[in-house]
Amino acid sequence: MGGHRHDRGSGARVSGIRCGRPADAQVARRRMSGMIASPYDEQLARIPVSAHRTDVDGTETAWWEYGRADAPVLVLVHGFRGDHHGLEPVVAQLPGFRIISPDLPGFGESATFRGRPHDIEAYADWLAAFIGAVGIDGPYALLGHSFGSIVAANAVARGLAPERLVLVNPIGAPALEGPRGVMTRLAVLYYRTAAALPERAGFALLRNGAIVRVMSVTMAKTRSKPLRRWIHDQHDRYFSAFGDRDAVLEAFRASVSHDVSEVAADIHVPTLLVAAERDDVTPLDAQRRLVTMFPDASLEVIPEVGHLIHYETPGDAAARILRFLRSGAHA
């Protein structure tokens, strides 16, 4: 697979080079850029990374490859309005894998879809095409987080065939029915307002820092002030990493109009649900119902965390994921 290495923080691309990044150099770059240092920097710095761009059915897709080329393959699908950075804390805990982590079309550094809406069918089709386009032709596992759980589940239900499927913070019930249904309705109003405004004003509303901060504060459950500051900094930097208003609005409609329960019965690969005890998006009772809808699934619950498992408890999540992937069945 051809590609370029991207040294996060520097913006430089060097063709054909893969190497690890010394932790002290990475921390220095973050400080120079004003970023709050990640608590997972040192672990992540030990893992080689390279960046690539690949045309996937007409959509230029940016993706990152972590770990050794001969290691077991794990493909990641991030959540709504995020990009590959969001799952790097989990990547940092899984050094024994070759991890493939793309930016979803319309987000991060990936282009928008050409000639079709950003709906679940389009994302599921793109995911299947992406796995073929990057040359994954052997066994692999697939992990989806939040909105990525809907995308991954739909792709598998439509015929994608990973050996194992992992859904972290899965969207297991309609968003409007969750404990934060009122908040979801406010979000719907927010996105409808952004759609109704002139493009420039709507774009500014979608990227409004105060609104992004309210979202971040609401979702973070940790009592650690340094960790909360880092989570807010991550959302400030990456939650508005999109370049097309319509794509974001279409993806939002997809995220609140669908959930994993719609296709669970059609997923016939061993599946692990990694749920959170305090998830405001899908409550634990709904996750317990969801796991019974799969032909072959198990549920792991991480205590005292909400919808940000990937930021707050990536080590705990990775340990459960690793047991599941290594067991050949369930965690």
Image (tube, rainbow, N blue to C red):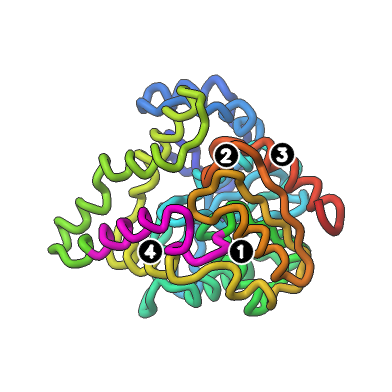
- Under circle 1, the secondary element is loop
Residue 328 in sight here: yes
Q: Nearer the viewer, mark 3 or mark 1?
A: 3
Span colored in magenta: 171-192
Where is mark 4, residue-wise? 252
Sequence-first tag of 1 and 2 = 1
Real-space Cα separation, disc 1 to disc 4, in angstroms = 27 Å
Mark seen at residue 95: 3
Q: Is residue 189 magenta?
A: yes
Q: Nearer the viewer, mark 3 or mark 2?
A: 2
Amino acid, disc 2: Val
Above or below, 9 relative to 146: above
Q: Dot 4 lies on which element?
A: helix
**Left or right for 164, reference 222:** right
- Which one is earlier in the sequence, the residue at label 1 or at label 4? 1
Separation of residues labelled 1 and 2 (CA atoms): 34 Å
Q: Which residue is mark 1?
A: 134
